[in-house]
Image (tube, rainbow, N blue to C red):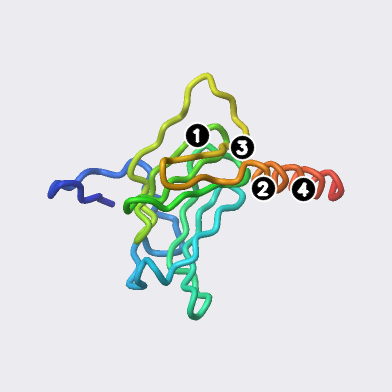
Amino acid sequence: MALALAGQALNNPFANPNNPHPMSSAVPQDDLLFLGTHGHVIAIDKKDGSTCWEVSLPRTGYQVVTMILEDGVLLCGTAGRVFGLDPQGGSILWDNQLPGRGHGVVAMCTSKQSTNQSSASAAFVAQKKQQAAGS
């Protein structure tokens, strides 16, 4: 799979040939609902609930994914990493591993918006309780 960046095609090292959903969407971005769970990001058509695309964030395990959509990039934080995704197709544009920063929940903030750290933390705790109850 290739990415187009400033008119150039780049190889995408994160492309997943086993992805059951194509890495493109004809649905307008404003009609997409983005979900982040268990190390995956999923784009759903708000009008009919169908999955437009899905991507597994590499080397993140099954953690909560926090997201901010801003300036044409879907910013996703999970497992001590931050990814920039193409919101229209789910391609991973970049990956910052945040070396030395741990592997937990990532709260994010830009000058325009922020994720709610308490909501992400509560979701993480609830996930751990559910896992403990199931074992």
Tag in front: 4 or 2: 2
For marks 2 and 3, give the CA distance: 11 Å
Amino acid type, mark 2: Ser
User: x, y (%) of residue 19?
Assistant: 44, 57
SS at circle 3: loop
For badge 3, the amino acid type reads Val
Neighbourhood count class around disc 1 (C-alpha, 10 Å): few under 14, some 14–19, many 20 upward: many
Q: Where is residue 55 in the image (x, y as percent from the top left)?
A: 46, 53
* Circle 3 residue: 105
* Amino acid type, mark 1: Arg
Left or right placement of residue 45 versus residue 103 in this view: left
Looking at the rendered structure, the kind of residue marked 4 is Ala
Q: Name the residue under label 1.
A: 81
Secondary structure of the residue carrying tag 4 is: helix
Point out the image quarter for the C terminus: top right
The residue where tag 4 is placed is 126
